[in-house]
Image (cartoon, rainbow, N blue to C red):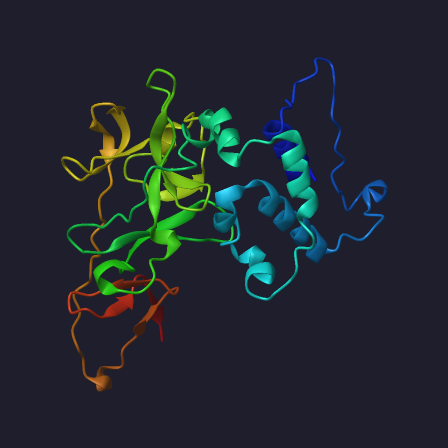
Amino acid sequence: ENIDQSIRIWLCGGRIEVAEGAYIAHMWRDAKNPKTTLKYPIPTRDVMRNKARASKAWFGEFTEKVFSFPEYEAFTKHGEPLGDMSNFDRLKDKLQCKPFTHYLQRFSYVYFDSGLIPEDIFQIREKKTGLCLERIQEQQQPHNVILMPCGGGEGGGTTPELQIWHRGNRDPSRKGKPCCSGIMNWNFLQCFDAVSIGSKLRTFDCEIQGGSINQHFTLDDAHTGQLFWRHHDASKRKGGDGCLDVVQVKSADSQFVDLDSHCSSTVEPEGTETVRSSGGGTAPAHFRVRST
């Protein structure tokens, strides 16, 4: 109902105002406080159906985008019915409701100036290796960003959405704070984030107002092709405090010894992360030495 009621108000002639001195309370569930225990069941299927109905009713041409997410597969692939939608049609005719694009334009500073609805999307390929930047989802953020074989394109197949990026976050250095001051992962509210020179590139929740300087990244695709961090002049695409580069994997020298010499230690892989070798194969990215 929160989706349905709020969008209905804005599209059908109403406004939502802040009432001075008014307070809205919400009681969070707390396992240690019996007063907050859920007193009634919440059937997940009905909740998702209500969300799907609200999306179908008000999002217009954007409904297809909403239904592309996995949580709506019950309705797009498995035939779950949405129910009768004719009451929405009658209401929209009666109140002369505007299309959803009117809502997006009304709040353009949220959706367009922040890059949440981007002008274009792209992959970022590292020139030397030919690999693409891909976000690796961790149990909790920050999430790592690594180089992986590029999906889609000349190689065919589907491009992983974790390899798809676009410009995002408002740019506080420019008048009106238009887009963009960072790089956002497509379909996720995750942005490039770095804490210092020499640190790893990771992603964190996007600060869409552009307030986090750790998320100030500029892709100079028209000139150098570099990805600058904390750029100095976003409008002219001039440099920054640092730029993204690849850390070269170093290999230790080794030699074979006769088994009779009784080796006192062994080298074994640590973790599951791998790197590509010059011969095209893969090798563990991290090793450890263990005494035998």
Q: In this view, does 176 lie above or below 91?
A: above
The answer to which of 255 and 169 lies nearer the viewer is 169
Which quadrant of the structure image shows residue 54?
top right
Which image quarter holds the C terminus?
bottom left
The answer to which of 47 and 99 lies nearer the viewer is 99
Expressed as whole percent of the image width and height from the top left, the position of residue 130 reads: 19, 56
- Judged left or right of residue 110, residue 79 is right
Which residue appears at 33% of the width and 58% of the height? Answer: 159
Expressed as whole percent of the image width and height from the top left, the position of residue 267 reads: 30, 70
- Judged left or right of residue 224, residue 159 is right
Residue found farthest to the bottom: 260
- Judged left or right of residue 259, residue 168 is right
The answer to which of 151 and 259 lies nearer the viewer is 151
Q: Is residue 18 above or below residue 243?
A: above
Which residue appears at 53% of the width and 57% of the height? Answer: 70
Residue found farthest to the top: 20
The answer to which of 157 and 57 lies nearer the viewer is 57
Expressed as whole percent of the image width and height from the top left, the position of residue 131 reads: 23, 56
